[in-house]
Image (tube, grey):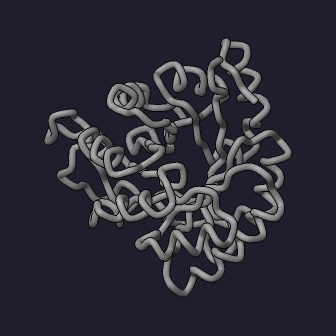
Amino acid sequence: MSVAVRIIPCLDVADGRVVKGVNFLNLKDQGDPVELARYYYEQGADEITFLDVKATVENRSTMFDVVARTADAVFIPLTVGGGVRTVEDVAQLLAHGADKVGVNSAAIQRPELLDDISSRYGAQVLVLSLDITRSASTPSGFVVTTHGGRELTDIDALEWAREAITRGAGELLVNSIDADGTKDGFDLELISAIREISSVPVIASGGAGSAADFPPAIQAGADAALAASIFHSKAVTIGEVKSVLKNDGFEVR
């Protein structure tokens, strides 16, 4: 029996509110995160992802409150990322109701963090977030970026994904910087390349512009698809996405 495709709305949260911007700049208020999470839950979202876009020590208590209130309001997995630097950060988020925790920059700086988190909490808790762009400087043609795609590293994205899996990452959230914001569809070449080397579930992110963009991403190898602006703007509903997927022969919940 095939595993159902997961559809995941992403909420960027700053100072306790959902915001929308470009590369975390010119942020505009989009509403209360708990209300939006409940709205997506009632629409049929399979999971919710929160990204703390102002992940500072001062903001952390606000995010803990948002996570706790959301966990009380929705009954689907909740992933929280942004500024997770230590095992203690993970412990706090899980204690406040998160089911999974996304790690990005801190793991690039100190890969052993992945070992520490997975050994203490298990791979099912650990999501590696990858912001990837094309580059001729690496063997695969893909490179890892930081700071929302604005800063390049010299790390081959496929090699880093492989290493992260061996260190205990249970899922890969693959955000295409090239496709992000274009609304021209997911980066199918990138998804396929990651799928070839990944033994864990792959979440496609970046580029969704319509419900019709989702089936090709799953066909390319994604187990789940994440989107933000098309859901926030109500240009596309989760129900519409699932209907298109079902019509194309994919199993959905």
Residue placed at 60% from the left, 27% from the top? 214
Q: Nearer the viewer, residue 197 or 120?
A: 120
Residue placed at 53% from the left, 59% from the top? 101
Residue placed at 63% from the left, 57% from the top? 99
Q: Is residue 213 above or below residue 103?
A: above
Count how many numbered circles sit on residues in the image.
Answer: 0
The quarter of the picture where residue 212 lies is top right
Percent position of residue 17, x then y: 69, 70
Percent position of residue 227, x then y: 60, 43
Q: Nearer the viewer, residue 107 or 177?
A: 107
The quarter of the picture where residue 172 lies is top left
Is 144 left or right of 50, judged from the image as shown?
A: left
Is 75 left or right of 86, judged from the image as shown?
A: right
Q: Is residue 205 above or below residue 153?
A: above
Is 141 left or right of 21, judged from the image as shown?
A: left
Percent position of residue 251, x then y: 69, 21
Quadrant occupied by the C terminus: top right
Q: Nearer the viewer, residue 105 or 112?
A: 112
Residue placed at 62% from the left, 54% from the top? 49
Percent position of residue 249, x then y: 67, 12
Q: Is residue 89 above or below residue 98?
A: below
